[in-house]
Image: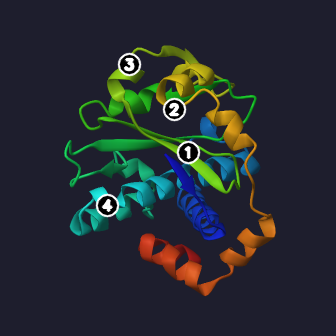
Amino acid sequence: MQIELTPDDWAIGAMIGHARRLSNENKRNKSRDRGNAKNIHVDLMGSMGEIIAFKAFQRYVSEESMKSQMKNLFGVAGGSLFTGADFYLDLHPKKLRLDVKTYDCDPSKQFFAINAKKHNRLKGKCDGYSCLLIPKYNKTAFLIPNVPCSDVDSWQLKSLGKYGDPSFNMPISKFVEKYARKSIVNDIRRSEFFDRDLIKVSLKSPTVKDKFFSICPEAKVLFS
């Protein structure tokens, strides 16, 4: 599922990521601290995954359920208090519960990885993963709506990188061949990016700020 993005989307993603960093300032596990620049990147890309899934799935979520689920995007107490899937599609025929994962298409990242601890914690609370393929500041994203949790159980379990957290991993080439199309990552890497200045303009827009606070009302206390 190809999704077109706007500078406003990236601006709101940056605001959510910044709010999360502020709220997690004294809560982030030292072993998970990648340094400021990488923390910003990780928080931005994670927020973008949820924003894009929010746009893609909103027709499957009732107004009442949407209000409660929007609270999961950001809370002043941090994300650790919420333990379920990111989205519950109460209007979908299968009543799906989906958690969102993002792959930033960095050529050095050879696997689509899902944290093993989080995956095991979600058992019985989640049906699958909505997987977003998106380079930073890209104009286009590709969303794979549902990779079943039962599939992930069979992926290779090992630790990637220096942080040491075990994850379930599938080579990205096999992942896209199975759940999308073989060329999708290269296609997205070749697509257009937004000029950073356009995103900066959106960051200063009162309309964009109002939209951000409508999505994350608790963030007002951090930005006041």
Element type where label 2 sits in the image: loop
Element type where label 4 sits in the image: helix
Q: Which numbered disc, 1 or 4, marks the residue that appears first in the sequence?
A: 4
Crowding around mark 4 (Cα neighbors within 10 Å: few <14, some 14 to 19, many 20+) is: few
Q: Which residue is mark 4?
A: 59
Q: Which residue is mark 3?
A: 153
Q: Kindly tell me whether residue 224 is visible in this rendering.
A: no
Q: Which numbered disc, 3 or 2, marks the residue that appears first in the sequence?
A: 3
Residue 44 position, x and y percent, is 62, 54
CB contact under 8 Å: marks 1 and 2: yes
Which quadrant does the C terminus fall into? bottom right
Q: Which residue is mark 1?
A: 142
Q: How is the image coloured?
A: rainbow
Q: Which numbered disc, 3 or 4, marks the residue that appears first in the sequence?
A: 4
Element type where label 3 sits in the image: loop
Element type where label 1 sits in the image: strand
Q: Which numbered disc, 1 or 3, marks the residue that appears first in the sequence?
A: 1
Q: Which numbered disc, 1 or 2, marks the residue that appears first in the sequence?
A: 1
Q: Which residue is mark 2?
A: 180
Report the amino acid beneath label 1.
Answer: Phe
